[in-house]
Image: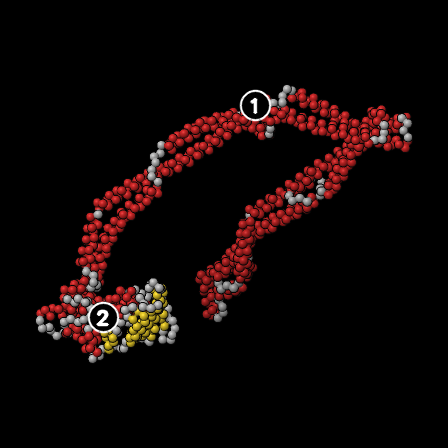
Amino acid sequence: MRIERIITHNLTGLGDLDLTFPVGPVLLFSEDRTRQRMLGGLFLELFYDIKNPLVSKVQARKGVVEVWMTGGNNRLHICRHSIMNDDGLERSSALEIEDETGQQVSLPERTTLGEYLFRVKQRAFLQGGIVEWPENDETANLSRYVRNMRQGGDAGLSLSKVRASLTGAQKRVKAQTESMLQVKAEYDSLRREWEEAHRQQEKERLLLIEIKNFQEKEKILAERISYAAKTQERLTVLRQNLDYRELRQLQGELARLEERYRESESKLTELTHETQVDWAMIEGLREECMEWAYLQEKVSRIAVEFQMRTQIINETQDFLQTSGYQGLSENEVQRLRRAKEEKHKAQQELEREQDNFTVVKSKFEELQKVCMEEIARLQEFSVMAGVTNALEIRIAQKERYLAQWQSSKIGNFLDRVLQEQLGVKSIGERFSLRIAKHYQNYHALNNQEFTSQLKEFRNQRERVEQLQLELERLNDKVHWEEKLRKIINSRTMILDQAFSKANVADLAAWLNGWEDHQRKKHQLELWHGELQLELEQLKMEESKMAASAKQLREKLANWGTLATDRDEVLAAVLKVARQLRAKDEAAREVNLFTEKFYNLLGDRNMEYLAKILEPLADLERENHRFNEEKMVEIAVWQKEQVEIRRQLETAEQSLQCILKFPSLSVLEKKIETVKRQWMAYEGLHDALDDAQALLENSWQEWKTVYGKQLKEEKKWIFSQMSSSPAKGAIERAVTEGKRDYFAYRMAIAQLALRDNNEVPFLFSVGKLSSGQSFWEEVLKYLLQLSHSRQVVLGTSDAELWQKLTASKWKSMVV
């Protein structure tokens, strides 16, 4: 890439510039060499974001740098805007890059402009793109620079000085060893104190937790023992009053009876106030009325019982008729049980043999295919089916006769006579033709082929028969699966029909329904008998009640009651009589239960017993398990309570005896302070060792990788500088020193770029000293270099500027 033009605006030090760089070497003249360095700093800031306050600081609110560059077929316009705050600090900076079409160019992430344009890193740009000639170019300084470059590739880095500095630093660090050991000892002491304080604090925390746990356990045990003691006292009272439950029941029943007596007395009072009948008359007929009321209640009770029993009988009959069991024989249970067993047995066998049935089906289908193939093969030998044993024997005899004839001398003689003299077929030939005709009928040429085909036919027939037998056996197994499924379906149908009629889900429910049906059927017969007895009793009691009512009416007539009022009086008397009867019965039961209750209670206090023994159900449950084992458990609790109390006192004493240490936060701050001192010392010591090791390794690596290349590159550059010999030895030594430094510096620049011609070359020099011939060689070298790279020579020497202005160099003033 070549720089075409640079424009700056409001930059401190550079101000406003507009420099256009022509093709070829360019000479920049400035009386102040600092402005030359500022131009190099501007390149570093623009291409590699290296801040230089003298360059980046702007004079006004806004500063601008614009650069136009070309390379190959591309042309770029680079612009950087800098805006300053009121305090003089840069507020924002924006970089804009446009190509020749005006399109914005985006840099890859984490890539600087120099890396994007020149494909070199910052260090390579510093070594090969910007070269400044030293202000002090005395021979001693140049020799030192050459030595530094040969050793580490950097003229300003002296290996001996760096080593001396590191050695001095290590000595100063070692001098602090004793004081650092004291710091380390203090750190260890504080650390141990912190650990002891932490252990004591943890111990104190654990003791507090342990004390709290002991207190909780002691409280729980005390509650258990107290509850057990109270329970034991209540159980003692319960054992002394085993009839308490009976007393409580009697007390409840007595209260219910007293309430019943009060209700009957209240109803009787209401009735006697409401009735219009004379009370004296009612008292006179009291016994008769009570007898009549008793009979009427008895008749009503029997009638109600008769009606209820009739309803139950009707409901039971309806249930039996709709239950689904009506009309079934007694052996229906056995039939359904047998059906279920057969179904279950078939299902078990089907499930057990299911996989086997699948295999059998598969084998059956495969064997059926094989059998069809073998039968087809057997059909190929169908002509052999007519061969009987007799035929086989005849053919064998004919073959034997033919063989005997052919082996006979007489036969051979006769055959020759017939053939040679008579010209007819021989007897042996006739035998052969006859036998061959038999073979043709069976598609054979000779006896061997006939015998082979017959044997193959019989083997194939036997194979087919074996396959058919196997097919029949497998077919039986396949049919057995179908038979099992038919059994399951038929038995399921039988069971489902029975279950659906009875509206049940399974046999167990059906059997329960059957037993219930039979039981209700038998019970229905008993109820019919009882209903007949109740009907007879009802009729007898109704006749008694009618006689009693007739007698009561006669007595009412004797009392002078009108016939029209007798029924009303009779109804009123009946109500009062019923209530009198209920009151007398309630009073009798109250007296009976009162006497029974107080006889059972004796001199005991029921309220005290209720307070101690209630709730009775819980206490009775405790009574069942409050035995010797419970007493042993209480004794164990008491021992455990004593032991816990002892442990609690021991823990409290241990807590009081714990030593008090400073707080952990105070110790941690002290430890952190001492630790920082010690770690700083250790870090500095290790850093110096690492720096020294890194220096030696870097120097060795530079010497190994670049040492030889540097010498060769320097030798080549040195050979390009053909100079005229100097007049004096001193001047010659000075010139040689400058050549040596220049050759090494340019060799480093070449090695850094590795034949990369994209990077512009900026060579800066101040006032030229003696050695005119040397600078002529330098200018000659730079002129040759300008053929491949853009070369910019900056100088503050007016004589050199005037001289080069007259030559091929294009000059500009900065």
| Residue visible at 32% across and 70% down in the picture | 10
Q: Position of residue 591 (x, y in %)?
A: 72, 23
Residue bearing mark 1: 236
Toward the viewer: 636 or 414? 636
Residue bearing mark 2: 32
| Residue visible at 35% across and 37% down in the picture | 200
Answer few, some or many: residues within 10 Å of disc 1's Cα (few below 14, many 20 plus, some between 14 and 19): few
The quadrant holding residue 759 is bottom left
Toward the viewer: 745 or 394? 745
Three-letter code for the amino acid on which mark 2 is drawn: Asp
Q: Earlier in the sequence, mark 1 or mark 2?
A: 2
Residue 618 visible in the shown view: yes
Circle 1 or circle 2, nearest the eye? 2
Q: Is residue 546 left or right of residue 67?
A: right
Quarter of the image containing the C terminus? bottom left
Instruction: Check the image and name the residue furthest to the left.
Output: 728
Q: Position of residue 264 (x, y in %)?
A: 76, 29
Q: How many marks?
A: 2
Q: Position of residue 113 (x, y in %)?
A: 32, 68
Three-letter code for the amino acid on which mark 1 is drawn: Thr
The quadrant holding residue 235 is top right
Quarter of the image containing the N terminus? bottom left
Mark 1–mark 2 Cα distance, whole angstroms, equals: 122 Å
Q: Is residue 351 above or below residue 150?
A: above
SS at mark 2 in the image: loop
Q: Position of residue 127 (x, y in %)?
A: 24, 66
